Structure formats: C-alpha cells, structure tokens
Amino acid sequence: MAFDPVFSDDGDSAAAAASRGRSICPHGCGRPSRVCLCPHLPPSPIPTSTTVVILHHPHALRRNPLSTLPLLERSLSNLHLLSGRRLLPSSTTLLPPPSPNAVLLLYPSPGAADLASWCRSTPPSARASPTLLLLDGTWRQAKEMHAASLPFLSSLGVIPVALPVDSGVDGDSMFESELVVKKEPHKGCMSTMEAVARALRLLEPEGKGEEIEEAMLGVLRAMVAFQAEHLQNRTVKPRVKMRKKKELKREDQHSNARLM
C-alpha cells in the first residue's frame, strides 16, 4: 500500500548515500553496503502467473528512502512499475480492455471486496492469470491518484479488492509487527511489498503462493531489522518547539508593557 516517507541514515536512498561518499552495494540492491539486502533477495526474480502493475507517485522513490519498490522489482519478474499521478489509456498497454482475465485494484475503498472471499467465490478459470494493480505513494497521494484514475479504471471493468483487516491483531501491521517499516496512520496498514506478498499468496496457484509470500516477507523482515537496529542506536535530539506568531507577539507586548 501507500505510506509516508521516514528519513534515516541507514535507510537512505542510493543517490543520497552516494552523494555523502558512502559505499553502495555493487550487486544491485542499491542500498548502502552496510545494510545490503542482496543475501536476502531471491537468486533471480520469481515468476508469477499474476501480472503486478504498480502506479507510483513521481516522488515515491526520490523522496521516500524506505520505499519497498526497488526490492519488489528485484523479487518479481512479472512486475511493472509506472510513474505518474493517474492512469490514462495512453499510460500503459499492460492494462487491456475488459477481457476474461480479471484486473484487480488492491485499494482499501469502501466498495472493495475482500480478496480472500473473491478468490473463494470465483471459479479458477475466471481468476487465472489476473492483473493486480496497486497505487504507491503517501496515503494522501494514493487517494488523489485513485480519484484521478477512476474514469480509466471504470472503463476497464476493474474489480476493487482489499486485504482482510483483523482489528484485534496487535502491532501496526495487520499481520506481523516485525514487518512494520514505519509507524502507520491506521491499524492494518502495510508497506506495498507486504501487500503484494499477501495478495500473491491468495492469487497464485495453491502451494506456490505460500512460497512466494514467504520469500518476499523474508526480504522485508531483513529490511525492517536493519531499520530497527539503526533507530535503537540512534541518539535523537529533542525537537525544537515551534512557537506561533501570536504567542511571540503577546510576549513582546507584555515585555514592552513592563518596560514602560
């Protein structure tokens, strides 16, 4: 799904790290060498019968050093990243007009069907080789991207779906607290990589889906562990309290009154 960026030293982007003279992993994960995730990535991108298409906000990679999109790109072979603020007919040929293959929009809209329930109620022939579409950005960006893309999505006959949320589960992730990349704004939020992993578990053939999910979550767990270790050892300076102009003006008036 979408999540707000959190900036940290060890989670920084490759470009920022390179500009500071840090050693960047030469094997392709693009992260600083000391937090390289290559040993945790699949030896080669995993093939899937599901085509995963992610429309990501233009700022999602440049301004979000904790974006999981680069890891997703290294993990799945049938993954396509599109940069933009909305989907248009000219955006991509990956989203065909209405066809026997389902196009699913994984987005927590009010009318979205539970993905697990949809899989159970849909015949195997009608859910074979689906296209899974996601929006990636901050929650505000994703909401704007969804609204702007609705005319095109409606013309495709897209099926809105969402992952089940168990409000009784502890932790900021609705599945595992150890997968939390950052503090999320709502219960049940998750990173885009976790959302794709959970969806593929349901959409891929029985047995294969579980293997794909576990391989992807192993990468995410390693990333979160690096981030948690960094934050644990980091000394955070107290944040300077911002004062409003009205407060400063009242203090000046009070000070001037005492001087008179």
Image (tube, rainbow, N blue to C red):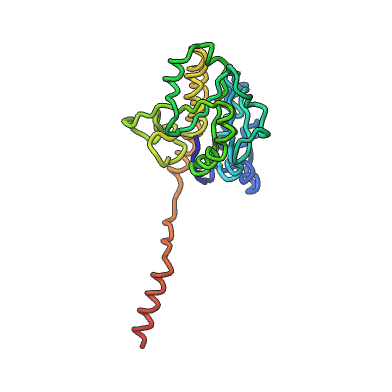
Q: Measuring 44% from the left and 26% from the top, which residue is drawn there? A: 113
Q: Measuring 54% from the left and 11% from the top, which residue is drawn there? A: 125
- Residue 49 makes an appearance in the image: no
Q: Quadrant of residue 18?
A: top right
Residue 44 percent across, percent down from the top left: 62, 21
- Residue 212 makes an appearance in the image: yes
Locate the C terminus by quadrant. Answer: bottom left
Residue 16 percent across, percent down from the top left: 62, 46
Q: Measuring 42% from the left and 66% from the top, which residue is drawn there? A: 244
Q: Quadrant of residue 112?
A: top left
Q: Measuring 45% from the left and 43% from the top, which residue is drawn there? A: 231
Q: Is residue 225 above or below residue 247?
A: above
- Total labels drawn: 0
Q: Is residue 111 left or right of residue 79?
A: left
Name the residue nearer the viewer: 31 or 5: 5
Q: Quadrant of residue 252?
A: bottom left
Q: Is residue 238 above or below residue 59?
A: below
Q: Is residue 16 left or right of residue 198?
A: right
Name the residue nearer the viewer: 126 or 68: 126
Residue at the extreme left of the image, as rendered? 168
Q: Is residue 78 above or below residue 247?
A: above
Name the residue nearer the viewer: 36 or 74: 74
Residue 200 percent across, percent down from the top left: 51, 21
Residue at the extreme bottom of the image, as rendered? 260
Name the residue nearer the viewer: 84 or 174: 84
